[in-house]
Image (cartoon, coloured by chain):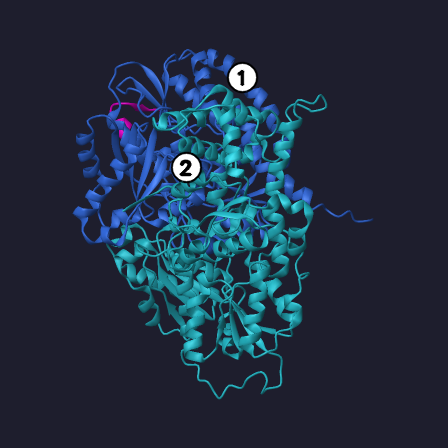
Amino acid sequence: MELTLWTYEGPPHIGAMRIATSMKKLHYVLHAPQGDTYADLLFTMIERRGSRPPVTYTTFQARDLGGDTAELVKGHIKEAVDRFNPEALLVGESCTAELIQDQPGSLAKGMGFDIPIVSLELPAYSKKENWGGSETFYQIVRNLLKDYSEESKQTWQEEKRRPRVNLLGPTLLGFRCRDDILEIQKLLGQHGIDVNVVAPLGASPADIMRLPDADVNVCLYPEIAESTCTWLERNLNIPFTTTVPLGVGATQDFLRELHEVLGMEIPQSVNESNNSKLTWYSNSVDSNYLTGKRVFIFGDGTHALAAARIANEELGFNVVGLGTYSREMARKVRPAAKALGLEALITNDYLEVEEAIKETSPELVLGTQMERHSAKRLGIPCAVISTPMHVQDVPARYSPQMGWEGANVIFDDWVHPLMMGLEEHLIGMFKHDFEFVDGHQSHLGHLGGKGNQNVNQEVKTTISSNSTTSNADPIWTHEGERELSKIPFFVRGKVRRNTENYARQAGCREINEETLYDAKAHYKA
Amino acid sequence: MSGATLLKESGPREVFCGLTSIVWLHRRMPDAFFLVVGSRTCAHLIQSAAGVMIFAEPRFGTAILEERDLAGLADAHDELNRVVKNLLARRPEIKTLFLVGSCPSEVIKIDLSRVAENLNIELKGQVTVLNYSGSGIETTFTQGEDGALKALIPLMPKSDQKKLLLVGTLANAVEDRLISIFNRLGIDIVESFPPRQSTELPSIGPETKVLLTQPYLTDTARELKNQGAEIIEAPFPLGVMGSTLWIQAAANSFGIQKSLVDSILNPLISRAKQALIPHVEELSGKKLFLLPESQLEIPLARFLSNECGMEIVEIGTPYLNRDLMKAEIDLLPPDCRIVEGQHVEKQLDRVRDSSPDLVVCGMGLANPLEAEGISTKWSIEMVFSPIHGIDQASDLAELFSRPLRRHDILNPKTLTSN
């Protein structure tokens, strides 16, 4: 039993719903009690979808349990097929139905429909949402293509046509998938590569049947598509790319990998530095202040890994924390963290993540909506880079994360919160000037203008909590505190920590004004 | 009874389960904690329905059952014990802990009452541990509050004091306002259940007169009656008329002179009616369809038809308690169609066929209907908004007129030249 307050991932059948709702002409009969229908609002509210998920919930009740729930399930399956007339049917159960073992999948298969029926077994008490999505996509592809017989498939060169690829993995409730696939399609178009099928997002079962027409699969979101890509490689001999084109460097690597797998010559344009504005903006002189910014990264595996690379190599940040809630991706995240001299944080306890943020006192947090809330509480700028997300992370405007334009979006999304931080500092600096209107607030609201009082309060509370922690800890004198409070809040945490470390090393019992400057000199030396 | 047509329907439903009540109950009693014993689905549901994650450590959580908890029940009980103790060590401010049953915990028959009993013995009054079910196989949405309140009743002290007890969660400001009106009528002792602190439970006895503020408290009302309290029959305090009848019913029960009641309520009534006018102009003659969810559908329909002139197409209700709803149904216009239960697909067919101007529905259905050009109102808003009482009638009406007004702003009628 695990105590959970807020959770990063839903149960595995939510992953299945994401696949079903992403696709067309597919229907999902979910053996589940009425409360499970809440899942519809994830799509209609977070993504503002104008149509209901194609899901029929059996909504069995306690009084049904004494009777024949199997008949109830069959009734719902028949009605769903009659009403929605899908090209293929998914049948599965949620956590409660798993316990009563009606085996709805087998029931559906025995009903004599002439459409493919995909039976889903998603263990609700051990697996989670992304796993459920991945497994569902894999089962759909495997079931629909299991009888596919390969007649001597020819390469694109032999057929004298443009190469074509499948884009696999984008789903609803994924992070910016809608725009990513447009961006990648555009990018591939520029290189003379056609897109055969995009799936699951927007694909029908008939489209899934066309997957084998592609020369290569592009695995855009490994959380969802890696197991499917592996199966297609093993059984249908379709190779797949493993680089996720998030960031300038990764987009270049992705293009090189794809050209190589397709047997194409790598064009020189891939290496040019003006594909994305990120490269130049990052070189622009005003970006000097980005150097060494402490950044804490947490999210799904794919986005956290990509963020670490972009932060480290393309923006010149200092990654002080890296982690994921996805146990399936831990294997990849651990070495990436190690390469940055860090230990990966693998947890689904957001309070543990919040603690880690506090400890590393970053200047920017890149995380999920959980970290956005934590960062807000801690007064640290934050950008959301990964699911779980909220309605504000589904912007109306085109804002991909992948490809060249994705890198542009990332530059803006990550750097603007920092610039806002700088603005707060300026507000603090100028607040004694007579032109300054008291009560001015920037978007960080609680920190701006009048809110500077809060900052001072925060200083005091941290001081008092610090002084109670242990006798060995140095004590801040009044002068020390006052000097510390003059330091811009976004570096104050770092200065505090450095000074305390220095004081401890130097054996100082108390920290006064001079200790602060001693520490400053010590760390600069 | 009026000429309302009562129908029953079964099929796929689209409603929340009783766990959702936690979203407002935890705010009502800030010293209580609601621990759902369930699955990741339960945790995900409450988080999605609540929508706000501003609390670092909210006053609700889920003890998520894992594979090994399903294997042996004895272990599951021990595990729950362990989780509770960890929680209480971390959150010493908790005074009342509700163990909330869910679909999976009910199906595998975890005996929460036994766990609660054992914990109460161990904790020796430091924290009171209670249990109730919010499972979707037994309860819908607001019924969760019914369960939570029923679980508190045995702890209520006994007294012979003559008093009015308002039962059902109200917004604090509305509650204060209603109490002050009762005080003006000469009813001096007015208490609320649930209280604002879980440890400050009102007393109960034969002189307690209960006035229900919410229509979903079937079990709570029955249990209060068993404890000797008198349940005052009345419609619910929504709209001018409903609220007036509700206050008058209490006044009658306390033997207060009609002239006093009139002299206090009449100014409020005329002021409230005045405030309603602009909304009535917008709502009058518009067609309303209510899908089942909050259990407030019948009182809302009564208000919107009688006081705002809306035409009722259909009133859906998750379940129908004819005793508690009698006063409401009597006030409905004749030939009103009330459908108990749901077949969501057939019901949506009827929505489309009747092309209503406004549909009251859950959050999952609202945007799909909006996309079809049908204005909607979330039913969950009714349980979060201060809508009870005479003074709130225009605010309540505005919840319904605003979507219509918005629809008109965004879809201006094109002027035809003639």
Percent of width and height locating residue A204 = 51, 69
Question: Which residue corresponds to mark 1?
Answer: B266
Residue furthest right in the image:
B418
Q: Mark 1 lies on which chain?
A: B
Task: Mark 2: give few (<14), some (14-19) or many (20+) Cα within 10 Å.
Answer: many
Whether residue A257 is visible, yes or no, is yes
Percent of width and height locating residue B229 = 28, 23
Locate residue B270: give its quadrant: top right
Locate residue B322: give its quadrant: top left
Q: Is mark 2 on a helix, strand or loop?
A: helix
What residue is shown at x 64% (from left), y 28% (from top)?
A: A429
Percent of width and height locating residue A309 = 52, 56
Q: Which amino acid does label 2 sit on?
A: Val
Examine the structure image and report whether residue A16 is included in the region drawn in magenta.
Answer: no
Left/right of residue B123 with respect to residue A340 in the rendered view: left
| Front one among B153 and B288 | B153
Marks 2/1 same chain:
yes
Q: Which amino acid does label 1 sit on?
A: Asn
A204 above or below A355? below
Examine the structure image and report whether residue B227 is included in the region drawn in magenta.
Answer: yes
Q: Which chain is blue?
A: B
The residues colored magenta run B223-232
Percent of width and height locating residue A488 = 58, 32
Q: Which chain is cyan?
A: A
- Which sits earlier in the primary sequence, circle 2 or circle 1? 2
Q: Is mark 1 on a helix, strand or loop?
A: helix
Question: Which residue corresponds to mark 2?
Answer: B23
What residue is shown at x 24% (from left), y 42% (from top)?
A: B80
